[in-house]
Amino acid sequence: MITERDVRDYVVWLTIEKGRSPATIEAYRRDVENFSRWMAAHGRDVSSVTDAQLEQYFNELRSRGQANSSIAREMSSVRGWFGFLLDEGRIDNDPTSRLKGGHRGRTLPKPLGEEEVAHLLDSIPFSTPSDLRDRALLELLYDTGARVSEVVGVTLSDLDFDEELILVTGKGAKQRLVPMGATLRTVLVDYLGAGGRSEFPRARRTAHLFLNARGGALTRQGVDLIIHKRALVAGIDHSRISAHVFRHSCATHMLAHGADIRVVQELLGHASISTTQIYTAVSVTSLQRDYRSAHPRAHD
């Protein structure tokens, strides 16, 4: 069931990851809450809404004489919200995919280049417990493509160093195994060794893998602060980087190196392969750009 917390998380996501203006965020929040109240008034759960119910809602808005521009914005708000819920694993299908009108197109992810990722990760020293934590955190985000909500939920018992696997748990307790690459394994061992995680307060009494300065579980907002701090030190524009960018980069780079799209779908935990296919578009775009700049016969 979708709750008020899901709406709040969407607002936080718009603020931190999308950098929307306060006015836009307020409009989107109001639109989503209006739709949620309409669903509740009709005894319906947002998590199981159908495209027919969506059409009914927007037709009612039209019958009230609401301006087309206002309806288009509300459609955009609702589309964005359901896209967020789907990407976070909180719903299994996007009911807005067949909604007519008001579609402004989905923005393609903007991944970091492979050299940028390497530079960012390699710029983190191994001097302090926080350094070791941050390196392990960013490696895990990039190496597995896991959602930030899944990463902050990883516990020590979810790590299997013998099989080199990590158990991640998404919304609705849906679990999947993701591989632990050689580099990720090394930095996790460093973080879990002397001078790393054990130096955080209450480390022995906390099951979560990643801890904050007080010894509690690291939050999504805490992860974004770490990413922005490390990007600033590495000389990378922090306004274009977030936990989701690591996920986008993982998928895009794997496809660029020939990974099967269904393998990437399984790794990212996408319910539908159509969600994964957006990363294929990014790879094709990169290919076209590189081809035009490098091939001697690609120009007039």
Image (spheres, grey):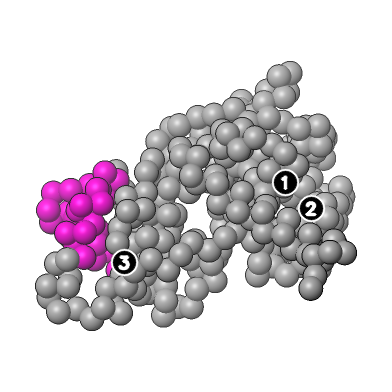
Q: Residue at x 70, y 42 (%)?
A: 254
* Residue named by callout 3: 101
Q: Earlier in the sequence, mark 3 or mark 1?
A: 3
Task: Point out residue 204 in the picture as x, y percentages from the top left corner.
Answer: 65, 32
Q: Quadrant of residue 193?
A: top right
Mark 2, mark 3: which one is toward the viewer? 3
Q: Relative to residue 159, is residue 113 depicted above or below?
A: below
Q: Residue at x 37, y 43 (%)?
A: 93
Q: Is residue 50 visible?
A: yes
Q: Earlier in the sequence, mark 2 or mark 1?
A: 2
User: Tag 2: Cα neighbours inside 10 Å, few (<14), some, or many (≥20)?
Assistant: few
- Amino acid type for the residue under numbered disc 1: Ala
Task: Point out residue 294 in the picture as x, y percentages from the top left corner.
Answer: 85, 62
Mark 2, mark 1: which one is toward the viewer? 1
The residues tagged by marks 2 and 3 sit, at their Cα atoms, a distance apart of 37 Å
- For the record, the magenta segment spans 30-58
Q: Are marks 2 and 1 in contact (CB under 8 Å)?
A: no
In the rendered structure, find residue 114 and report the number of the disc placed on it. Answer: 2
Q: Residue at x 12, y 75 (%)?
A: 64
Number of labels in the image equals 3
User: Tag 3: Cα neighbours inside 10 Å, few (<14), some, or many (≥20)?
Assistant: few
Q: Mainly helix, strand or loop, the magenta region?
A: helix
Would residue 61 appear left or right of 214 to someone viewing this image?
left
> Could you tell me which secondary element the residue under label 2 belongs to?
helix
Image quadrant occupied by the C terminus: bottom right
Task: Point out residue 292 in the picture as x, y percentages from the top left corner.
Answer: 78, 64
